[in-house]
Image (cartoon, rainbow, N blue to C red):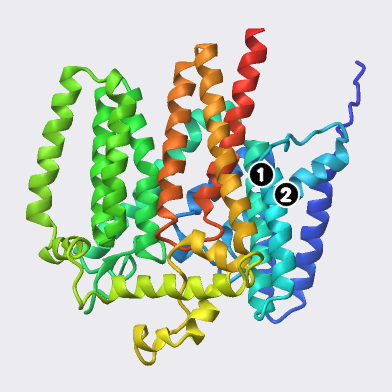
């Protein structure tokens, strides 16, 4: 009998990573903590799983986004789980390109015509800032943010765009809202702030109530899409349950701006899906609204309604609104001082801490460095009119990408893709509006939206080619 000896070719990616892992483990064995030598091996298993499905690794990063309070490993600021995932994916892609020179990265996008000049302006201005260390740190974070956008453009497939990513967003954000409700109503310090006294607000698994409010608004269009697109009654009931959980999470944040944007969002959702709703569904939704109103009156504490009313009856005691006004005053002063190029990326809080108005707005012993609670104001102060123009241009380009994709999907008769792309667009728009109320120069869901706008455009162009 004759046997053929067929050798198997060792994947160079795994060979390189295995070699690195062995070297690290041997080194750890010589230290005072040899038991940690098993950690690189576990990391190798993790790396192997990621390398087998890079898109899944990208979705794992997105799943972790609401868990800001628990993403750091060992409490180390820059040792973050989502960063480790992202750089692992980049490392695998780099090795794949070395071993397969024919692999191409589809990174063509008009978004870069806005984002790259925006980065260049940020870099140059920050080098000459009065706070160069703070400004340049934010420039580095900006580069990491662009890397995240690029990964989304490269990795997300049609199935990931239309099915997997919406489920990931719904699951992770709903988990945050549920934990916020538990923390607020049962005084669990892990998921709420100031439960022992003071102004109690729900945090969920993030670090800021306003951040949770923003996430709830971002996911609401996907929940509406889930309800409309599902045919199984059980899954529609699940969608309604998740809507209630996220609304409860929003309530715990006491966000006034979030409520105003929610009203606008509900109107936009109704307008978008009205033609698909039968009289039975309209009756069901009206019954649901009635149930929510009755439940809200019986469950939500009076302090919540008092805070919402304060938005329309501004009194002298509302220090929160006065403080927000003070941010605008300081922002205007910094803009007038450097109107074209700005004062350095992310340095607004430094100037606010130095301002005289902070003496009145910040209580003694508290941190005087406060963000502007307005991302557009942060951009204006950091990079002047030039940066604001480029940032708005990037937002406008993303919106155009979604609009062009929707038109192409309509022409190709892909109704499901039309609906999900409109959902992404709606979430992107409400997020862009919320940035008037929240400071986050590298807002993760905004980065996801940038990437998905290009993915949508690419998929719609492929639909056109398929039709031809």
Q: CA distance from mark 1 to mark 2?
A: 8 Å
Q: Residue at 67%, 65% (x, y): give it.
A: 139
Q: Quadrant of the C terminus?
A: top right
Give coordinates of residue 452: x percent, y percent. Answer: 56, 37
Which of the 4 quarters of the picture holds residue 141?
bottom right
- The answer to which of 193 and 401 lies nearer the viewer is 401
Quickly name the residue at label 2: 90
Q: Is residue 53 visible?
A: no
Considering only vertical position in the picture, is 454 above or below 135?
above
Q: Is residue 240 visible?
A: yes
Q: Is residue 391 left or right of residue 287?
A: right
Look at mark 1 in the image and give the residue it sits on.
Answer: 151
Q: Secondary structure beneath disc 1?
A: helix
Q: Are marks 1 and 2 in contact (CB under 8 Å)?
A: yes
Name the residue located 16 percent from the left edge and 18 percent from the top edge: 279
274 vs 89, nearest the viewer: 274
- In this view, the residue farthest toward the front is 336
Q: Is residue 151 left or right of residue 252?
A: right
């Amino acid at each position: 009998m004759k046997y053929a000896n067929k050798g198997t070719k060792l994947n160079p990616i795994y060979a390189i990573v295995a070699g690195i892992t062995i070297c690290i483990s041997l080194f750890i064995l010589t230290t005072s903590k040899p038991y940690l030598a098993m950690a690189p091996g576990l990391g190798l298993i993790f790396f192997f799983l990621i390398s087998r499905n890079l898109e899944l690794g990208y979705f794992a990063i997105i799943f972790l986004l609401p868990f800001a309070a628990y993403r750091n490993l060992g409490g180390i600021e820059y040792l973050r789980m989502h960063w480790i995932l992202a750089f692992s994916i980049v490392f695998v892609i780099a090795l794949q390109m070395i071993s397969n020179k024919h692999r191409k990265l589809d990174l063509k996008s008009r978004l870069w015509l806005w984002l790259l000049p925006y980065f260049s302006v940020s870099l140059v201005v920050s080098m000459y800032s009065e706070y160069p260390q703070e400004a340049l740190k934010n420039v580095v974070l900006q580069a990491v943010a662009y890397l995240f956008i690029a990964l989304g453009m490269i990795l997300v497939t049609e199935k990931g765009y239309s099915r997997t990513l919406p489920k990931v967003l719904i699951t992770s954000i709903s988990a945050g809202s549920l934990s916020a409700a538990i923390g607020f109503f049962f005084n669990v310090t892990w998921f709420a702030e100031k439960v022992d006294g003071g102004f109690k607000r729900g945090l969920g698994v993030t670090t800021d109530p306003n951040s949770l409010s923003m996430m709830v608004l971002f996911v609401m269009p996907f929940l509406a899409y889930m309800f409309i697109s599902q045919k199984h009654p059980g899954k529609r009931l699940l969608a309604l349950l998740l809507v209630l959980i996220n609304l409860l999470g929003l309530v715990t944040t006491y966000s006034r701006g979030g409520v105003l944007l929610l009203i606008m969002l509900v109107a936009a959702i109704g307008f978008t899906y009205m033609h698909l709703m039968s009289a039975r569904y309209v009756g069901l939704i009206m019954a649901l609204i009635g149930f929510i109103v009755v439940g809200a009156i019986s469950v939500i504490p009076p302090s919540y309604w008092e805070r919402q009313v304060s938005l329309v009856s501004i009194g002298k005691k509302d220090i929160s609104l006065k403080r927000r006004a003070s941010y605008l005053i300081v922002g205007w002063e910094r803009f007038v001082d450097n109107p074209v190029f700005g004062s350095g990326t992310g340095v607004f809080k430094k100037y606010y801490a130095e301002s005289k108005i902070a003496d009145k707005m910040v209580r003694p012993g508290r941190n005087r460095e406060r963000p502007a609670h307005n991302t557009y104001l942060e951009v204006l102060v950091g990079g002047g009119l030039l940066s604001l123009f480029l940032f708005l241009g990037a937002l406008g380009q993303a919106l155009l990408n979604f609009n062009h994709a929707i038109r192409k999907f309509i022409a190709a008769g892909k109704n499901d893709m039309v609906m999900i792309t409109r959902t992404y667009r709606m979430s992107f728009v409400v997020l862009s509006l919320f940035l008037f109320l929240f400071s986050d120069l590298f807002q993760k869901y905004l980065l996801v939206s940038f990437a998905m706008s290009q993915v949508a455009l690419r998929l719609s162009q492929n639909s056109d080619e398929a039709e031809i």
